[in-house]
Amino acid sequence: MIFDIAVLGGGPAGMAAATEAACGGARVALLEESPAPGGQVYRAPPLGFVTKPDRDRQEGDALRAALAASGATIHTGCRVWGLGGGPLVPEGQANTPFSLSALAADGAPFTVQARALILCCGTHERIIPFPGWTLPGVIGLAAATILLKAQGVLPGRRVVVAGAGPLLYAVAAKLLTGGASVAAVVDAATQVEWLRALPALAARADLLAQGAVWRAKLLAARVPILAGAQVTAAEGDNALKRVRVGERIIEADALCIGHGLVPATEATRTFRALHVHRPEDGGWVPVLDAHQRTSVPLLYAAGDGAGVRGAAAAPAAGRVAALTALQDLGIHAGAPERLSTENAALARARRAGAAMARMMALRPAMIEAIPPETIICRCEGVTRAKIEEAAAAGAGTINQLKHFTRCGMGPCQGRMCGEAAGALLANARGVSVADLGFATGRIPLRPVPMASILGDFDYADIPVPAPAPI
Amino acid sequence: MKARFDAAVIGAGVMGCATALFLARGGMRVVLLDRGEICREASGVNAGTLTMQMTRAALIPYALHAHEMWMNMPAWCAGGDVLATACPGLSVAFTDAEAAMLEERARIRREAGAPIELIDGRAAQVIEPGLADGVKLAGHCPIDGFASAYLTGRAFRAALQEAGVTLMEAIPVRGIDGRFVLDTPAGVIAAQRVVLAGGVWLEDMAAWLGVTLPIKVLINQLVVTERLPPVMRTVLGVASGLLSLKQYANGTVLIGGGWQGIGDRARGGLAVRPENFLGNVRLAAHTVPALRNARVVRSWLGLEAETADALPAIGPVPGIDDAWIIGSVHSGYTSGPYMGRILAQAILGEAPELPLFPINRLLQERSNAI
C-alpha cells in the first residue's frame, strides 16, 4: 500500500501534522522512534507509571488523543534507517513515492511508502566540548529530561545544571521535584540577555509564567544561580566528582549540560533539499517556503527540525505542512482560511520561540575557550588541535575535514561534534560556517544492525550482477 | 599570452596529483586545478582495495609497481601516508560456476604476473579464520593489501606544495581556448601543456578540445560498519569481483565490490539503491559470518569512469600537441600513482617505464579543433 502522507517523527509537529492530514482525508502513516508519540517536551511517561500530570503532560496528552482518534497508522518504537524514492531516482526518471525503511520495535524490518513526506525530526543537543565532558556522569540537558520524564530516574544525587536556554531551568526544577539536590545552575546567559528576551516572550504569557514558576522553585531551594558563567572543566577519575566554574569548585556526581539545540537535517540532506545556515535557527536548516515546503516536491519539514522555535510553535507548523500537502496532493483544497489561521498562530508562537532560540544559539566565546587537547569528536577521538592542524594542512570544508581527521565519521555521524567542529574549522580558516558546507547526507539515518536487515536468504538468491571484464 | 605554467593538470584525483607531482619534480612549473577539493571524488571515497585479484589482467604489471608505491608512500610523497597495509588477498568461490570463473581468471592474472595460487576452502580458512564454511576454491595472492582512501588528498597535498605545484581547489575550469588558455572563475590561466585528469568528467573535458571520448559512469556503492573486534585479517573478495572486504586498524569493516547506486555525471552519487545495499551486505555477511553482529554506520557512493573497452585512457590527445589525458583505469586507485608517474615520464620527454594506453582506439571521430 502507498500512503498519501508519511510523517517522520512523532513530536508535537509530527503529531499535529499526522492528525491534520488524516482528518483531511489522507491515508497517513506516522513513524516515531520512542515507545509513544510526544517528542522531547511532551514525552509520555513509561507504561504503568503514575505521575502528576503537569502542563506539558496535559498538552502532550491532548495531542496524543487527537492523533489516536485521527485514523492515522502509527508506528512507534521503530527505527527508520533508510530513505529513498522521491527525487532519488536515475537521471531522466520522474520522482517516485518516498520510501522509508524501518525496523519495528521487535526488530522486524518494514517499509512505508508515501506520495508525500513530512519531516518532523526535531533536534540534537549541542554540547560545546570542555575538559572532562566525556566523563561518566556528564550528560546532556535533553538526556536528563528523557531520564526524568520517560524513566523517572535521577541522573545523580547532587547535580550541577549548566548551559544555555530555558531547558536549564526546566531541568533544574524537575530535578528538585524528583528529590535531587541541585548544587548550582550555571547559565551562559547574563541577566541582561534574559531581560532583553522579555518583550518577545511577553507574547506568550504562558511560557513566561512557566519560567517564573521554575525560577521561584530554585529560589525557594536556595540553589545558587551563576549567570553569565560557564563550566570550565568536569573532573574525576572514572566518574564525575567536581565541576569547575572558573575559580569555583562544585562537588557533584552529575552534570547536566547543554548549549542549545541543532535541527536534525539528516533526512533533508539525504533528499538533497536546499539548506541555509542560520545561527538564530540553530544552524543548518532546510530552505522552506511560507507553507513548510522544502525545495524537493512533496517533501515538507516542520517543528524544530526545520529551525528551532520550540514545542509551542511546532503543532501549528505541522498543521500548515499537512494542509499544504493535502492541497499539493489534490486531496483537500478547501481550507485556505484554516491555513491562514494556523499560519497566524505559527507566527505568534515563533516570535517567542525565536527569542529562546537566540539564547540557545552557538556562543563563539565558548568555542574560543576550548583547550587544544580537548576531544571534539568523541567517536573518533579528534581534538581541537587536530582540527586546527587539518585546517592548516588544507582542509577547507566539513567533508574535507572528515577525510583529513575522521571527525564525524563514527557512529554519531557528526551529530555530537558537528557544530563545534564547524565553528573551529571556520575560525581557523577565517571563513564563516556557511562557507564550509555540511556533511553529505547518507543512509543509514541511525546505525542499523546488519542481522536485522539481512533476513533469511540463500546464496543463490543474491542477485549478483555481471562481473567486470578480465 | 605568455604561459605562466609549463603544465596545467585539470582534476586533482590520485592520477592528477601523481602526474602533477612528478612533472614538478621533473622541473616543470605546474598548476593543479580541481572544481572541488583534492581527492574528494573517486580517489578519496573508493574502497582502498590494493589487490591484484580485482585488477584487469592487462593492468597487473602496473598494479604491481603501484602496490610498491602505495606501501612506500611516505618515502616518495614527502611523508604523506594513506596507511597502506600489505596483507594476503583471497578471492573465493562458493559455487561450481564461480570456481570455474576463478580458475580461469586466476590463470590469466598469473600469466600477467600476479602471484596467485589456487587453494581449497580449508586452506583459505587458515589464511582467513573469519571466512565462512562452504568455500569451494580460493585464489590466494600474498601481496595484496588496502589503504585508507580518505587520506589520499591530505597525503598528496604537502608533497605537491613541497614540489612547488600551485594547487587551486574549488576552481572549476569552464573551457580551454587555444593552446592553452584555461577559463576559470579565478581568471584565465595559461599553460604550455594541459593534462586532463577528470575521472568520469573526462568526456566533458575532452570536448573542450573538440575530442569525442565516450566515458561510461559507474556509481559504486560502499558501506562501512562501526568499529568491531578483529573479525578478519585479509582483503577478501568473491570470484565475480563483486565483493571487497577489509578490516582497518580502527576496527571498521569496509564493504564494497561495485554494486551500483543512483547517480550520474551531473548530480554525482545521488543515493544508495536499497536492493543493492541489501545484496552487498548479504554477500559480505555470507562470506564473513561475524559481520552479522555488526552495525552499519554509513553508506556512500563513488563515481568510476570506464572507456568503451574498459582499458585506460592514458597518453597524448591525438592531433593536439602537448595535450594529454589520464583516467578510466579499472580499479584505478590501485594503479593510480604509477599511472601518473609514467604519464609524467612521457610528458617530460622520457621513455615511460611501461607503455601508455593511447586513446586513438577510443575516438569516434577525428578531432577538428585545431
Image (cartoon, rainbow, N blue to C red):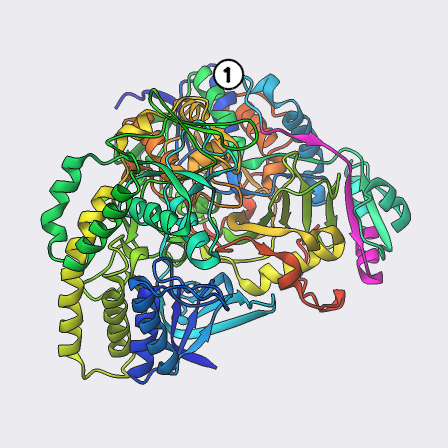
- Name the residue nearer the viewer: B180 or A318: A318
- Give the labeled residue for mark 1: B26
Q: In which quarter of the image is residue A129?
A: top left
- Quadrant of the drawing holding the C terminus of chain B: top left
Residue B222 seen anywhere in this rendered image of the structure: no
Residue B209 placement (x, y as % from top left): 38, 41
Residue flagged by tag 1: what amino acid is it?
A: Gly
Residue A210 placement (x, y as % from top left): 22, 55
Q: Is mark 1 on a helix, strand or loop?
A: loop
A168 vs B343, left or right, is left
- Name the residue nearer the viewer: B329 or B141: B141
B125 vs B6, left or right, is right
* Residues shaded magenta: B82-103
- Name the residue nearer the viewer: A385 or A468: A385
Image mark 1: chain:
B
Residue A280 placement (x, y as % from top left): 22, 45
Local crowd at mark 1 within 10 Å, few (<14), some, or many (≥20)? some
Residue A254 seen anywhere in this rendered image of the structure: yes
- Quadrant of the drawing holding the N terminus of chain B: top left
Magenta segment: does it hold A393? no
Residue B170 placement (x, y as % from top left): 34, 35
Residue A94, above or below B259? below
Q: Residue at x 43, y 35 (%)?
A: A400
